[in-house]
Image (tube, helix red, strand yellow):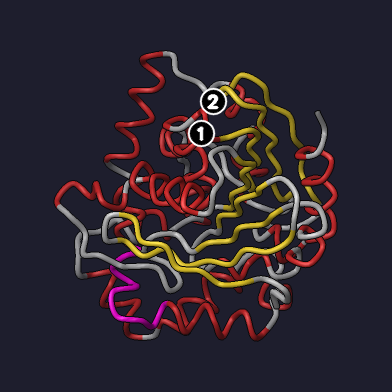
Amino acid sequence: MFEEYRSFSIDNNGIRIPGLIGGSGPPLLLLHGHPQTHLIWHRLAESLARHFTVVATDLRGYGDASKPPGEPGHANYSKRAMAADQVAVMHELGFERFLLCGHDRGGRVAHRLAMDHPEAVEKLMLLDIAPTLAMYEKTDRTFATAYFHWFFLIQPAPLPETLIEASPADYITRTMGGRHANLDAFDPAAIVEYQRCLAQPGAAHALCEDYRASNTIDLEHDSADREAGRRIACPLSVLWGQHGIIERCFDPLAEWRAVAERVDGEALPCGHYIPEEAPSALHDHILQFMKTA
């Protein structure tokens, strides 16, 4: 699926982050979401490589990346820690400054990366998310019903881990297939890969720790930014699915304008999984935004 890309594996303080790199041009880092891996970009990999040096990684705890046990307070799965992994990867590859696009959980890592490392991010694109703090503060019945996993995965270990580990393959198909596009949107080979990765030892725990961190330490970091008046400084483009829960429950442009200086964006004719549901539209938006001076 990533022809002419080469694989790499980079260690950051004992955390192994694998990924693929290919193409030529300005560096573009792509970060995936839950419950997936870097494979979400497979329908854009060839076309983006004609314009960018594309780097697609697995986040800490996902795919074939390291899955350390969670620490008290969940700090080692904070978006701050996960963002630092990605900065280390890009520095090791020779990129001090880069373009950044993140979907879902990868978008939350990208948000924190832009806040903690503003010198590293030239432009930022976020896919189908509103800010974590805003989403928790404005939770209602519609959101909680559709995004039940936000409240299931944060329950104390080992309850959610035990239930996921009973059938990780079903967790993938039921979670991803329960959205707007059902499973028809996905390449069957990609589904098999997502299932393989979630079945690895420690994967369910890592996935839960990511969400536990979002409900605790990540909110502390986001609240500290708000209280200090810190905002995303680089240009930000926000895209979301018009058939998704972000469209239904939030005003994404207003929410991102509350935390960023320069924001534009729009809804795309798809659901949550934009890179796999609407790759052509996403490709065009990436080119228009990332390559415009």
Image height of 179 relative to 118, above or below: below
Given residues 159 and 37, the one toward you in this image is 37
Q: Is residue 11 left or right of residue 33?
A: left
Asked if labels 2 and 1 touch by Cβ distance under 8 angstroms, the answer is yes
- Which quadrant of the view contains residue 248? top right
Name the residue that disc number 2 marks. Answer: 232
Q: Is 158 a magenta residue?
A: no
Image height of 49 relative to 241, above or below: below
Circle 1: residue type: Ala
Q: Is residue 172 left or right of residue 150?
A: right
* Residue at 66 percent of width and 31 percent of height: 236
Q: Which residues are magenta?
A: 198-207
Give the image location of residue 37, x and y in percent: 53, 68
Give the image location of residue 87, x and y in percent: 45, 45
Main structural element of the magenta stretch: helix, strand or loop? helix
Image height of 232 relative to 165, above or below: above
* Residue at 34 percent of width and 39 percent of height: 218
Give the image location of residue 76, x and y in percent: 26, 51
Give the image location of residue 157, x and y in percent: 19, 65
Image height of 168 relative to 274, above or below: below
Q: Is residue 90 left or right of residue 136?
A: right
Q: Earlier in the sequence, mark 1 or mark 2?
A: 1
Name the residue that disc number 1 marks. Answer: 114
